[in-house]
Amino acid sequence: MAIKPPRLQSGDTIGIVTLGSPLDANITNARIQGLQNMGYNIAYGRHVYSWQGIAAAPAQQRAEDLMMMFRDPTVKMILPTRGGTAVQTILPYLDFEEISANPKIITGYSDITVLLNTLYQFSDLTTFHSLLLIDFRPNTPSYNFDQFFAATSTLLSPRVIENPPDMPQISLVPGDVTGPMVGGNMASLVNTLGTPYEMDTAGKILFLEEINAPTTMVFRYLVQLLMAGKFDDCIGIVMGECTNCLVSYGTSYEDLINEWLVPLGKPLMTNVATGHGLYKAAIPIGATVNLNTTENTLTVIEPTVSP
C-alpha cells in the first residue's frame, strides 16, 4: 500500500514549481492570487518564472526546486504551474528515498504524468492526477474543485469517481477488478518506454487520456503501449477523453478503443472526465481502486491522504 501524504488544510503552505515548459508570469501571478484568496500561503521555487525555451530552466535546476519543496517542512502540497514538455528530464536528478521520507501531496496532469507515476513507482508515494496551478481560476467548474479537495483534503473512503451529469461513463467490457491505479497522458507515458522510468502496469488498473493528437498519433501511442506489454500486464483499463483529437482516415478515438482495446477482454471503462478535458476527476496514482464495469462504477476504496 502506497504512502499517503498528509492532507491539505486551510492556511497550509503550497509550494509552486515549474517543472516543464514555462508559463506566462501574468497567468502565474493571477492563479497564485486565487490560491491566496482561498486562504493558502505560498512558497516559490527559484525557477517558477524562468523562461529558457522549451523548458523553463535546465533540468537539474528544476529538479532542485522540486527537492527543495519536499525538504521544506512548512510546505504541505506541491503544485506545478503547468506540464508542457521536458518534465521527464528532471527524473535522474531526484532523490527518491528522501521524497519517500517526506511525503507530500503533488498534483497535476499532462507532462506531469511522468513525475506522478515515477514518484509512485520509486518513492511509493500516492500522487494525484488532478489540478495544476493554471486551473485555479474563477471559471474552473466546481466539479473540478470538488474532486480535487475530496481527494486531497478529506479522509473520505470509499470515494466514487463519477462524471458530471450529462457526461456518461461508458463500460464496454464487463468485469470487476481491484488494484492500484497508474497512468495519465499517453504521449508522456510513451516517452518513458525503454527508460529506467518506464511505467509498471503489472497488476494495475491503467488509465489513459490525450489532447490535440490526430487519431493517427493516438493509434501510434496505443500500438506502442500494446507492443511494450502494458496492456498485457494490466488488470483493467480506464480511458479518459481525447480532447481536441482530430479524426484521421474516418477513424475516431472511439473507433480505436473498439478496435484495439475491447478485444483484449479486460474490464474497460471509457469517457471518464480527466486531464485535459473541461471536467477533471481526481485520479489517485498508486491508490487502490475498484473498477466494476458490470455496475459501471469506478471507486477509490481507501483514503488517499493521511490525517
Image (cartoon, rainbow, N blue to C red):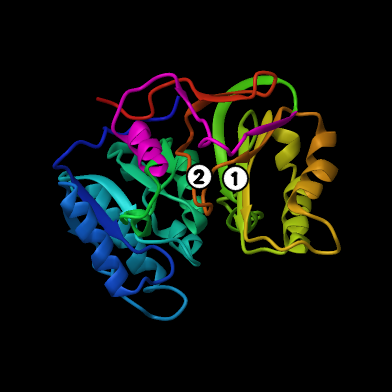
Question: Residue 172: image x %, image y %?
Answer: 75, 31
Please tell me which of labels 1 and 2 falls first in the chain.
2
Amino acid type, label 1: Met
Determine the CA span between mark 1 and mark 2.
7 Å
Question: Which residue is identified by label 1?
Answer: 199
> Which image quarter: residue 233?
top right
Amino acid type, label 2: Asn
Question: Residue 179: image x %, image y %?
Answer: 57, 25
User: What numbered label is drawn on residue 117?
Assistant: 2
Task: Check disc 1 and report its element: helix, strand or loop.
Answer: loop
Question: Residue 159: image x %, image y %?
Answer: 44, 24
Given the current orientation, which residue lies at the most extreme bottom position? 53
> Which image quarter: residue 92?
bottom left
Q: Is residue 89 magenta?
A: no
The magenta span reads: 143-172
| Residue drawn where x is 25% and y is 65% of the image | 30
Can you say which quadrant of the picture contains the N terminus? top left
